[in-house]
Image (cartoon, helix red, strand yellow):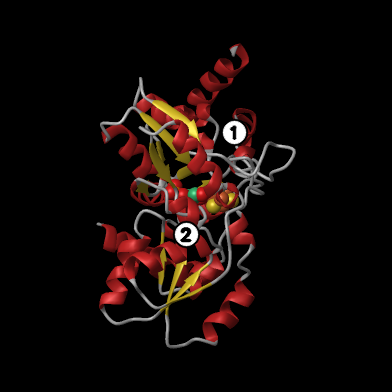
Amino acid sequence: ADQRSTLKQRIKQLLKEKQAVLVSHYYVDADLQDLAEETGGCVSDSLEMARFGRDHSAQTLIVAGVRFMGETAKILSPEKRILMPDLDATCSLDLGCPADEFTAFCDAHPDRAVVVYANTSAAVKARADWMVTSSIGLDIVAHLHAQGKKILWAPDKHLGSYIQQKTGADMLLWQGSCLVHDEFKGVELELLKAQYPQAKILVHPESPANVVALADVVGSTTQIIDAAVNSPADTFIVATDNGILHKMRAAAPGKRFIEAPTAGNSATCKSCAHCPWMAMNGLQNLVDLLENMEHSSANEIHVDPAIGQQAVTSITRMLDFAA
Ligand code: 13P
Ligand code: SF4
């Protein structure tokens, strides 16, 4: 604990000295979430992270999250320096949707509006008409459906089929998934609910359909935290990365949060409700990054400017729609 507080103090001092701002996701280490909040940065879902990074006046943003979050920040603010504690922090959705295969898929279906999830590479976003996050994907697809448009959706199949079911839109789905959320189990969740009949079930829509079907609230990380705070219930079962519990417990003290069941324990499941790439962000690599940022570009996000210029359109459409 002592060493952690020393590192935290050092990070606060360095952020100030280097005029850098920290933007953290709810799935990263609790200390990194707290630091973002305590130093005038932000801890949020991916939509709010994108907006905050774009609007903040600091010329250096440190993104504690996964690579697509850093790339989105860079695409929206090419003039800013975007740094990440570990550039190898990727996402199974991004990995499962290579730009060349995706482009061929789009080319084969030219009659469809291309809507991609934020969890994709810059090149995939560049091929899209719209980029969406989990907090607003449903509203945007409903809007396009109302205009009579058919949709090509990528890459998350669970989020895609949830939106399809809710909106009735004609959606052709890429078959990607999140390795963390894919592990949540419907049957076990039902059994757990039977043990806690008063509990409300909060679910991130990257989870399988039989888990989403049991949810009282389906939403982005920010939306399910808000639901926990605003609900009169005092017990919640949470189906998303367990990094979120830190903020939930702080925001709703006195309430009880129980992790939704996964396939097994660390010996049998790949992720056990915690994203291995989010976990690559730590206090020590953040200190190292801040200490060396003048002399090293090893942790800097670069996006090909031509790709960035194409990708910014799909992201800006979403931000304008959300405004
Ligand atoms: P949110 O936009 O809900 O924060 O989700 C991002 C993410 O990667 C979920 O796994
Ligand atoms: Fe990707 Fe899933 Fe990790 Fe989110 S939790 S970054 S969707 S692998």
Identify the residue at image location x=26%, y=76%.
Answer: 146
Give, as a three-letter code, the residue at label 2: Ala
Disc number lying in front (1 or 2)? 2
Q: Report the residue at 57% width, 44% height from top.
A: 84
Query: Looking at the image, which is closer to me, 53 or 81?
Result: 53
Q: Residue at x 56, y 47 (%)?
A: 185
Residue 51: horizontal and vertical position, in percent?
A: 35, 51
Residue 323: image location, x then y, percent: 24, 57
Query: Label 1 vs label 2: CA separation?
Result: 24 Å
Instruction: Give the number of the disc on residue 118.
Output: 2
Q: Which numbered tag is attached to residue 286?
A: 1
Q: Secondary structure at mark 2?
A: loop
For the point 29% across and 82% down, the residue is 148
Q: Residues within 10 Å of mark 2 (few under 14, many from 20)?
A: many
Between 200 and 64, the one nearer to me in the picture: 200
* Element class at badge 1: helix
Q: Which mark is residue 313?
A: none
Q: Can residue 22 be spotted in the picture?
A: no
From the image, which quarter does the N terminus lie in?
top right
Mark 2 residue's CB less than 8 Å from ligand 1: yes
The answer to whether 54 is drawn above or below residue 34 in the figure is below
Is any atom of residue 230 visible in this view?
A: yes
